[in-house]
Amino acid sequence: MPSTKKTKKDTSKAPADKPAAADAKAVAAAANAKLSKAERRERNVLRKIKIDKLVLNISVGESGDRLTRACKVLEALTASKDGDDGQTPVTSKARYTVRSFGIRRNEQIACHVTVRGEKAAEILEKGLRVKEYELRSRNFSETGNFGFGIDEHIDLGLKYDPSIGIYGMDFYVCLTRAGARVARRRR
């Protein structure tokens, strides 16, 4: 008499793409084994340092016409070559009154703009060329960010306009790595 028990089919077979993925991992592991530690570190995408943002600041020290002209300089610097308008600068206010400087609390005395991406790298390259690619050790913070100043904006390749004048500016660069946001995010 035949048994009425049904046998379960073996469903533990792996899909066809699993062995291929395992082979790819083995090939990658073998390739990494041949590389030295320094070469593996160099190829690691998460270790590559990139520019998070570039902040350009012009501190005029007074409100009015000079501040408006400084904003025009920053806008011209951030404008692209295809004729697009540049980023609109943000003005900064004085924290408190300083009589010897002639500024009052909440008076607009500076303007700044934050640039990211390819445009930041392009402007930073111009600024470092003015400084001849040499910075002092005190220009760097403990976290690897750095800043420097230039005396004349026309050194960056902008044309001199007598109605605007010449302004110096500060560059501050924040560097980051891919995945750095994970350490700072809210949990």
Image: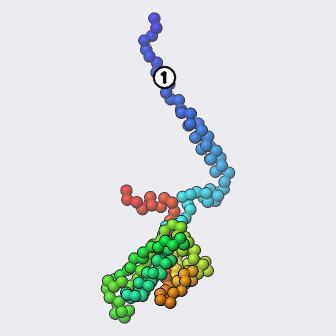
Residue 160: x, y in percent?
54, 86
Residue 162 shows up from this direction: yes
| Residue plotted at (60% across, 38% down) | 20
Quadrant containing the C terminus is: bottom left
Instruction: Please tell me whether residue 149 is drawn above or below residue 81 in the rendered image.
Output: below
What secondary structure is marked by label 1?
loop
The residue lying furthest to the front in this view is: 83
Instruction: Please tell me whether residue 101 is drawn above or below residue 156 in the rendered image.
Output: below
Residue 112: x, y in percent?
43, 78
| Residue plotted at (46% across, 77% down) | 75
Instruction: Please tell me whether residue 37 is drawn above or below residue 12 in the rendered image.
Output: below
The residue lying furthest to the right in this view is: 34
Instruction: Please tell me whether residue 173 is drawn above or below residue 149 in the rendered image.
Output: above
Amino acid at the residue labelled 1 = Lys
Residue 137 shows up from this direction: no
Circle 1 residue? 9
Quadrant containing the N terminus is: top left
Horizontal arrangement in the rendering, residue 134 relative to residue 117 (left or right): right
| Residue plotted at (47% across, 73% down) | 85
The residue lying furthest to the top in this view is: 1
Residue 123: x, y in percent?
54, 74
Given residues 132 and 35, the one toward you in this image is 132
| Residue plotted at (51% across, 62% down) | 177
Residue 92: x, y in percent?
38, 80
Horizontal arrangement in the rendering, residue 94 relative to residue 33 (left or right): left
